[in-house]
Image (cartoon, rainbow, N blue to C red):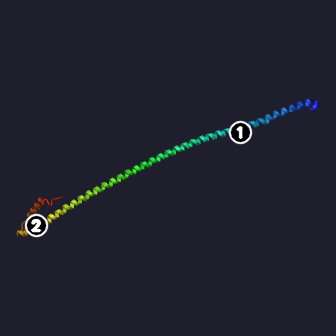
Amino acid sequence: MEGLGIHLSSLIAQLFNFGLLLLLLYMFAYKPVIKMLDQRAAKIKESVDQTEEIKKQHELAEKETARLIAEAGKEGKKIIEQATLIGEETKQKAKQDAKTEAEKLLAKAKLEIERERDEAIGELRSAFADLTMIAAGKVIDRSLDKEQHRQLIDKMLNESKVLNKN
């Protein structure tokens, strides 16, 4: 092999040096690089896992938000229905109160009209009695006791159906 320019001693020395270089590279370069690559892969895996977890949490939050919005919508509709119902009840109560008040005023007005009518009839009877006494006194040309005339006229008026009509 010496004819090719390869010496056994230098080949062994070069193989030994190459092996030593590989050992040193493995210990001081390859292991740290592999360790660094493993750490980086672990960080990437952790980031991917965190991203997946965040995605799941985001989806859950979206579902919860949608549920809360739907629930709030139902609550809102319920509140609106209650407010509408209360409004209708208040409207009906106000209407009933107004009707009751109108009926009271009408009854009061009827009583007042009846009282005034009775008062007017009483005044008319009194005036009629006075006129009748004067006329009767002139007709019979003598004057009777006013109290007797009034009693007689009141008796006749009470018996009369025309003036006693309500």
The quadrant holding residue 31 is top right
Spot the residue most to the front: 4
Badge 2 marks a residue whose secondary structure is helix
The quadrant holding residue 156 is bottom left
- In the picture, measured across the screen, residue 50 lies left or right of residue 99, that is right
| Residue that appears at 43% across and 48% down | 81
Q: Which mark is residue 103?
A: none
- In the picture, measured across the screen, residue 34 lies left or right of residue 104, that is right
Q: Quadrant of the C terminus?
A: bottom left
Residue toward you, 25 or 61: 61
Amino acid beneath label 2: Thr
Would you name the residue on which mark 1 appears? 40
| Residue that appears at 28% across and 55% down | 103
Q: How much space separates mark 1 and mark 2, taking CA atoms? A: 133 Å
Spot the residue most to the right: 3
Q: Earlier in the sequence, mark 1 or mark 2?
A: 1
Residue 90: x %, y % from top left: 37, 52
Residue 116: x %, y % from top left: 21, 62
- In the picture, measured across the screen, residue 53 lies left or right of residue 165, that is right
Badge 1 marks a residue whose secondary structure is helix
Q: Quadrant of the N terminus?
A: top right
- In the picture, measured across the screen, residue 126 lies left or right of residue 85, that is left
Q: Are marks 1 and 2 in contact (CB under 8 Å)?
A: no
Residue 114: x %, y % from top left: 21, 59
Q: Which mark is residue 132?
A: 2
Classed neighbour count for the residue bearing mark 2: other residues with Cα under 10 Å, few (<14), some (14–19), many (≥20) = some
| Residue that appears at 71% across and 39% down | 40
Classed neighbour count for the residue bearing mark 1: other residues with Cα under 10 Å, few (<14), some (14–19), many (≥20) = few
Amino acid beneath label 1: Arg
The quadrant holding residue 133 is bottom left
Residue 51: x %, y % from top left: 63, 41
| Residue that appears at 91% across and 30% down | 9
